[in-house]
Image: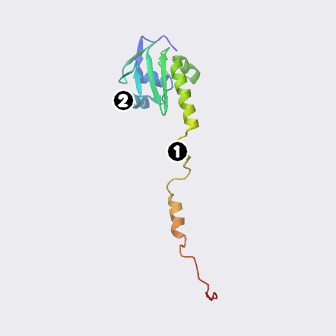
Amino acid sequence: MSDAPAGMRLDKWLWAARFYKTRALAVDEINLGRVRVAGQPVKPARDVKVGDLLSVRTGTVAREVEVKGLSQQRGPAPQAQLLYAETAASITAREAAAEARRLAPEPAASIEQGRPTKQDRRRLADWDRWSAVLDDDDPG
């Protein structure tokens, strides 16, 4: 954390706080409405200040965090975690969602094999479907 000015760009803060791997990904997620400031949809260039309440969704995980610090550069994960604090309500909601996913997993996740690969299709084509051969010795 540094003595940065009063605010900084939202996309840059999300990148520095390690919510997204690149600023471009942060911009895409903001534009898709997956990041909100005080419940309002925002643009990537919006200034974030200490004390702002952000709603951030990464994948299936939704978090509500309060901005605790600003950093102009991306540091190690322990340093990035000092830039925000997750709200108690967000923590309980996230844990409840994780428990629900554990108890009732997505049915599609259990499918181990989907469409046959090209190699599988070739193997199926080579298989002789009409391999049942009648023996001439059988009187029946």
In the image, is 26 to the left or to the right of 103?
Answer: left
Point out the tag, 1 or 2, that comes first from the N-terminus.
2
* Whole-percent x, y for residue 129 in the image: 53, 72
Rounded to the nearest whole Å, what is the CA distance between mark 1 and mark 2?
30 Å
Say which residue appears at 51% left-offset and 68% top-offset. 125
Query: In front: mark 1 or mark 2?
Result: 1
Which amino acid lies under the numbered mark 1 shown in the image of this protein?
Pro
Scheme of colours in the image: rainbow
Which amino acid lies under the numbered mark 2 shown in the image of this protein?
Asn
Q: Secondary structure at mark 2?
A: helix
In this view, the residue in front, 22 or 134, is 134
Q: Residue furthest right?
A: 137
- Judging by the rendered image, the residue that carries numbered circle 1 is 107
Say which residue appears at 59% left-offset and 21% top-offset. 78
Q: Secondary structure at mark 1?
A: helix
* Whole-percent x, y for residue 40 in the image: 36, 21
Neighbours of disc 1 within 10 Å: few (<14), some (14-19), many (20+): few
Say which residue appears at 57% left-offset and 24% top-offset. 77
Tag shown at residue 117: none
- Judging by the rendered image, the residue that carries numbered circle 2 is 31
Residue 94 visible from this viewpoint: yes
* Whole-percent x, y for residue 135 in the image: 62, 84
Question: Would you place residue 122 above or below residue 70 in this image?
Answer: below
In the image, is 7 to the left or to the right of 78?
Answer: left
From the image, which quarter does the C terminus lie in? bottom right
